[in-house]
Image (cartoon, grey):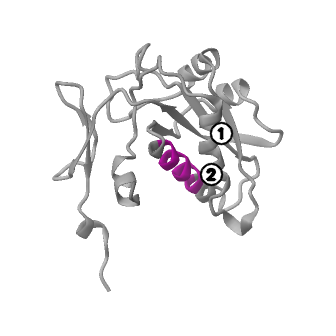
């Protein structure tokens, strides 16, 4: 698959086929791609927790906040929840580059997940205390990001943003994501 196709297909998925479990080996392959990603001064300070069991996924799920623009939607229902999670941890004493490294690692993970036929959703809004307590958070580290993973259970449609950039769902439950046009985001010299 060409990178442009991979980028086009890698969308935030918020409804999954929960019954289709993902193996620990598959999730570790996604983390391995993040391990190979560039990072500041090659310090490699990030750590990753892999959550694949149904029981552990069920304990993490309530700590997550889903789709801020969909105010009346509480998140995926039973049967639509993620089959796995990757939690990205960073040192408690954050450096100026830390969040950039987390973003790069997350991008590598979701792109490799998509290439493997999986959907993902990068979640920054979550109860850090619950997540840290449910996964093996290294000493002096804290969770900065949770990536939900699974086989997609929804259709995501990209469209041109006309007036509003907020994503929305139509009457058939399809998730619409408005994107600005290229000329709207590029500045000329």
**Disc 2: which residue:** 34
The prevailing secondary structure element of the residues shown in magenta is helix
The image's mark for residue 28 is 1
The residue segment tinted magenta is 103-113
> Looking at the picture, how far across and down is residue 56, in whole percent?
64, 19
Viewer-nearest residue: 6 or 187: 6
> Looking at the picture, how far across and down is residue 43, in whole percent?
76, 62
The kind of secondary structure element at disc 2 is helix
Viewer-nearest residue: 180 or 81: 81
Is residue 1 on the magenta stretch?
no
Query: How dense is the environment of label 2, judged by Cα within 10 Å: few (below 14), some, or many (20 and up)?
Result: many
The kind of secondary structure element at disc 1 is helix
The image's mark for residue 82 is none
Q: Say which residue appears at 52% left-offset and 28% top-offset.
A: 64
Viewer-nearest residue: 62 or 23: 23
Q: Say which residue appears at 53% left-offset and 40% top-offset.
A: 124
Query: How dense is the environment of label 1, judged by Cα within 10 Å: few (below 14), some, or many (20 and up)?
Result: some
């Amino acid at each position: 698959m060409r990178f442009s196709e991979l980028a086009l297909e890698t969308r935030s998925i918020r409804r999954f086929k929960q019954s289709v479990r993902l193996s620990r080996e598959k999730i570790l392959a996604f983390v391995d791609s993040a391990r190979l990603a560039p990072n500041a001064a090659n310090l490699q300070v990030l750590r990753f927790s892999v959550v694949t069991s149904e029981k552990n996924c069920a304990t993490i799920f309530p700590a997550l906040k889903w789709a801020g623009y969909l105010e009346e939607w509480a998140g995926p229902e039973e049967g639509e929840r993620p089959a796995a999670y990757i939690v990205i941890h960073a040192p408690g004493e954050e450096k100026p580059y830390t969040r950039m490294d987390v973003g790069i690692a997350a991008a590598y993970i979701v792109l490799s997940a998509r290439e493997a036929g999986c959907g993902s959703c990068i979640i920054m809004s979550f109860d850090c205390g619950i997540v840290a307590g449910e996964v093996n958070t290294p000493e002096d580290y804290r969770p900065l990001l949770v990536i939900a993973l699974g086989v997609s259970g929804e259709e995501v449609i990209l469209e041109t943003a006309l007036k509003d950039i907020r994503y929305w769902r139509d009457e058939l439950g399809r998730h619409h994501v408005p994107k600005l046009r290229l000329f709207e985001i590029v500045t000329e010299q």
